[in-house]
Image (cartoon, rainbow, N blue to C red):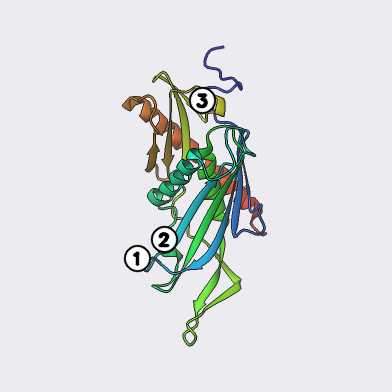
Amino acid sequence: KENCRPDGRELGEFRTTTVNIGSIATADGSALVKLGNTTVICGIKAEFAEPPAESTNKGYIVPNVDLPPLCSSRFRSGPPGEEAQATSQFIADVIENSEIIMKEDLCIANGKLAWVLYCDFICLDYDGNILDACTFALLAALKNVQLPKVTINEETGLAEVDLKQTNPLNIRKHPVATSFAVFDDTILIVDPTAEEEDLATGTVTIVMDEEGRLCSVHKPGGSGLTAAKLQDCITRAVTRHTEVKKLIDKVIKSIKPK
């Protein structure tokens, strides 16, 4: 059969995507995302810190991706390997370029106190396309975060936390990643499995926001792409964004207290 992949999908077809929000009770925000077999969980922990000296009105967002041996035999235990580091860097770039959150929104008191959001990703099952799964998990988890109200006591200079009053984060943009595997410079397949990634001559990831703005194009070497092929990828990424946004909105609506 022409244009059919090993798992029966067409070239432009994504695997079944599911998201579960708020599944880690001990985190300030969390999400579990599945793309076919690929499973990633993201937990967000908020802590206090002093704002950076060079920009006293900003907080921090610190992503860290863990690819343990549990998720695939290709990974070894010990310090993070090359792929885990590259994925962490990719997520950091997406946060920066998409302006998903303005770091100014994380400042509590200028020059004194700010929030640090530690975004920890753990891959539970690795079957290709880790970048899309992590980007989706990040967005879903950030939308789940509730931060307590914090005021600085004028007399003591100490922070006072009101756990009864919590506010969601101000999510300004909704970046969604769409990854493709390239074969022989001509054939593009969307959402590659681990087997397809290993056989591909290159991969490319496009990150778009809801306004159709290009946040990032990630192309780690491999075979080149013509402008027309890249445009095809961008067009597919726009439709994927609509699908993912619908899915997140539906899940959030279903867990909102009545």
Give the residue at mark 2: 103
Residues under numbered marks 2 and 1 in contact, where contact means CB atoms less than 8 Å apart: yes
Residue 45 visible here: yes
Report the amino acid beneath label 3: Asp
Q: Label 3, on which residue?
A: 198
Check the image and report above or below for 164 versus 155.
Answer: above
Q: Nearer the viewer, mark 1 or mark 3?
A: 3
Residue 68 figure quarter: top right
Give the quarter of the figure containing the N terminus: top right
Q: Which residue is mark 1?
A: 55
**Residue 43 spot, x, y in % from top left:** 59, 53
Asked if labels 2 and 3 touch by Cβ distance under 8 angstroms, the answer is no
Residue nearest the observer in this picture, 141 or 173:
141
Q: Quadrant of the C terminus?
A: bottom right
Q: SS at mark 3? A: helix
Using a 10 Å C-alpha cutoff, classify the residue at mark 2 as few (fewer than 14 neighbours), some (14 to 19) or many (20 or more): some
Front disc: 2 or 1: 1
- In percent of width and height, residue 81 lies at 51, 40
Which x, y percent locates residue 65? 53, 46
Q: What's the CA distance linking mark 1 and mark 3?
A: 42 Å
Amino acid under label 1? Ser
Q: Position of residue 200 (x, y in %)?
A: 47, 23
Q: CA distance from mark 3 to mark 2?
A: 37 Å
Residue sitting farthest toward the top: 1
CA separation in Å, label 2 and label 1 = 10 Å
Q: Secondary structure at mark 1?
A: loop
Residue at the extreme front of the image, as rendered = 78
